[in-house]
Image (cartoon, rainbow, N blue to C red):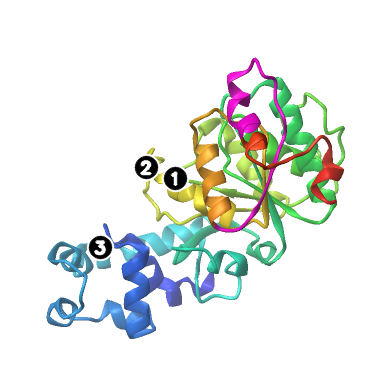
Amino acid sequence: MADLEKKKYWIWLSLIPNLGSTTIQKLLKLYKNPEVIFQLTKKELSLIKGIGSKTIENMLDKHMKENLNQHIQYMIENKIDIISIYDENYPPILKKIYNPPISLYSKGDTSILKNPSMAIIGCREGSEYGKKAAKYFSYHVVQKGLNVVSGLAKGVDSYAHIGALCGQMNAYSHVDKVQNCVNCGKTIAIVGNGLDTIYPKENERLENQIIENGGVILSEYPLNTKPEKMNFPARNRIISGISKAILVVEAKEKSGTMLTVDFALEQGRDVFVVPGNINSINSVGTNRLIQQGAKLVANYHDLFM
C-alpha cells in the first residue's frame, strides 16, 4: 500500500469518464507513462486523433485531479490496491485477451493471480442441485491447485466461492456459511462495482472470508462505482479472460452466464458444462451448450482428463 502514491496516475486514468480501454492503450503507446499523460495540455491532447473535446475536458478536470488524494487515502485505510497492466502481479493470461482491463483494483492477495484458475459460473436463482454442484466442483478444483474464479453474485457464484473455501467439509453439505476454514483453496471474485461497495450486501461475510483465506477481490471499476447493470457484461470478459477454462453449472437461455460463455469461446477457453434437468428453466442454456459441443461433466474427474 505504501506504493499507492506512485500509482496515483493509474488511479486518475481509471477515474476519467468515457475514456475507454482502447483510447488508454493508444495514449500509453504514445507516451508510455500515465504521469506524462497527466501532464498533457489541452493543445497537446487536441492533436491526438480519436479523442473528442468532452474526453479532453474530463481529462483536464482539476476537481478530479484534486480528489486523487482522497481516493488514495481511502484505499490505504481499506487495504485496496491497484494493479496496472504493466505490473508483475497482473494476470499474464488476461493480458492476451481482446480489450484487457488497463488496471484492476484489488483487495486481498494478488500473488495468486499468477497461478492457473478455472471459472465456475451459473444462475443467480440457482437451484439446490446447482448450488450443490457448484460447491462440489469448486472444492475439487482447488484440491488440484487451481484458483476458482467467479462473480460473487447470488446463487451459483456464491456457492462456487464457498466450495473453494470449505476444504474441511463435505462438498455436498448444505452449510451456506464458511466456518473454521481449514486447508482452504484460493478463490478470486470479479465484481462489477467499486471496491468501496459490497454487492450483494448479504455477501459481505463471504467477501471477508475470501480475503482472510488468501483470495482476492478484483474490479476494473474505480471507487464510487455502483453495481449498474451495464457494468456486468464487461466484468464477464474478465471472469473468462483470467481463467484457463470455465465450468457452467446452470444457465438460462439468455443470461449473463451465456454471455460469459461467448467471451470464453472468443478467448479460446475450454468450456465445460454440468447437465441439468430438462424441466428446469435454469438448464435450458447448459443443455443447449452440450448440444453445441461443450464438454459434459458428470464428476470432477471429467475436468482433468
Q: Is residue 230 above or below residue 103?
A: above
Kindly tell me whether residue 193 is visible in this rendering: no
Dot 1 amino acid type = Pro
Residue at x-position 41% and y-position 40%: 227
Q: Position of residue 44 (x, y in %)?
A: 17, 82
Q: Which residue is mark 3?
A: 64
Q: Work out how far the residue at label 3 is from the one at label 2, CA to CA, in angstroms.
A: 23 Å
Name which quarter of the figure residue 283 lies in. top right
The percent position of residue 118, horizontal first and vertical second, equals 69, 51
The Cα atoms of the two marked residues, 1 and 2, are separated by 7 Å
Discs 1, 3 touching: Cβ within 8 Å: no
SS for callout 3: helix
Residue at the (63%, 63%) spot, across then down: 110
User: Start and end of the magenta stretch?
Assistant: 267-288
Q: Which residue is mark 1?
A: 233
**Res 175 label:** none
Tell me: 284 left or right of 24. Answer: right
Q: Is residue 269 magenta?
A: yes
Q: Nearer the viewer, residue 27 or 14?
A: 27
Residue drawn at (56%, 30%), measured in percent from left and top?
202
- Tell me if label 3 and label 2 are in contact, CB under 8 Å: no
Q: Which-is-in-front pick, marks 3 and 2?
A: 2
Residue 230, numbered label: 2
91, above or below 135, in the image? below
Foreground residue, 56 or 245? 245
